[in-house]
Image: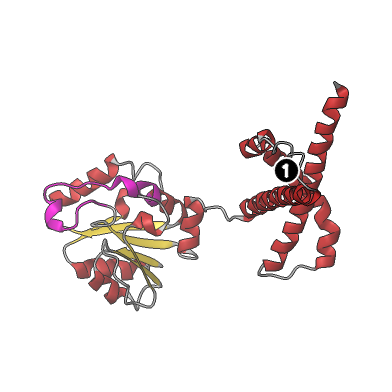
Amino acid sequence: MAASTAPVVDSRRDELVDLIQRFVESLAEVSERLPFHIDRQKFCSTRTLAALVIAIVFAWKLLRSPSNHQRRRRKWPGPLPAHANASSRTNMMVQSSEVCTSSGDLKVKDVVGEFFQPTKPTLSQSVRQKLGEGRKVTCRLLGVILEETSPEELQKHATVRSSVLEVLLEITKYCDLYLMERILDDESEERVLSALKDAGVFMSGGLMSDKVLFCSTENGRSSFVRQLESDWHIDSNPEVILHLARFINYELYISPNRPECTTSNGFTSTSLEQFFGVSS
């Protein structure tokens, strides 16, 4: 029994050693394609310890993978006929060796590629990366935070877009956020504030109701932005975006059609959440 299991253990050990060697070689290839220079002598002196730790984990994963089990269960070709010559036997052995070597190389390259594949940033990281050094943000409500797109609709109802809530709350953790909109009557203001409250916008503590500003004209909204000296302004009106271009460091134009923004400091997106990488 011990004699029968010994070759299996030796085979797995040899396969593990072979995978480690291939992994180290692949790491060396990856290092040559990096955008910064790595001293190969220093890399050669330190790569073995690092590669051994990493390679053992990935090699064990490869050895335990379903595809590897299937490969071990794969039946080898039956014995050659008696009349087969030595050349035929040699060719078959070479082909079998090439298939195994190619499979091993592909697995190692897949593991190295998976190891160096960049991870998707979290929403918090995306907000910080996109807004950069901006610490004060002003944002229009209609067409951005609310489902409604005109002041006339606010005279009947106000609905907060559920898909934008997570982004909105994350911005309030990082920036001083002010929301603003043009309305036609006092009842519209009450509807908007009630909708924001019911959606939980004011519960995080980052945004309070007195940071929601209302005016009666589009110029009034532009005046709010300039007085607040905002770093970023988000709007769905292209005329406001153009008017504020020379006063604001950065602008985000929200439009379902996503036309190109004509300002040098402007960005365009179909929605606020799409700009920050959130799938709608």
Q: Residue furthest top?
A: 1
193 vs 260, nearest the viewer: 260
- Name the image quarter holding residue 230: bottom left
Query: Circle 1 sits on which residue?
Result: 59
Extent of the magenta region: 146-168
3 vs 58, nearest the viewer: 3
68 shown above or below 231: above
Q: Is residue 155 magenta?
A: yes
Query: How far across and down, in percent of the image, does residue 77 sit?
Result: 69, 39
| Picture residue at 80% right of the left edge, 68% below the top | 39
Q: Residue furthest front?
A: 83
Q: Residue furthest right?
A: 3
Residue 226 visible in the current orientation: yes
| Picture residue at 37% right of the left edge, 54% below the top | 273
Query: How far across and down, in percent of the image, does residue 275 sit?
Result: 39, 59
Q: Is residue 114 magenta?
A: no
Of helix, strand and loop, which one carries label 1?
helix
| Model colouring | secondary structure
20 vs 44, nearest the viewer: 20
**Mark 1, residues whose alpha carbon is within 10 Å: few (<14), some, or many (≥20)?**
many
Query: How far across and down, in percent of the image, does residue 43 sit?
Result: 81, 62
The three-letter code of the residue at mark 1 reads: Ala
12 shown above or below 238: above
Left/right of residue 273 with respect to residue 12 in the rendered view? left
| Picture residue at 80% right of the left edge, 56% below the top | 47
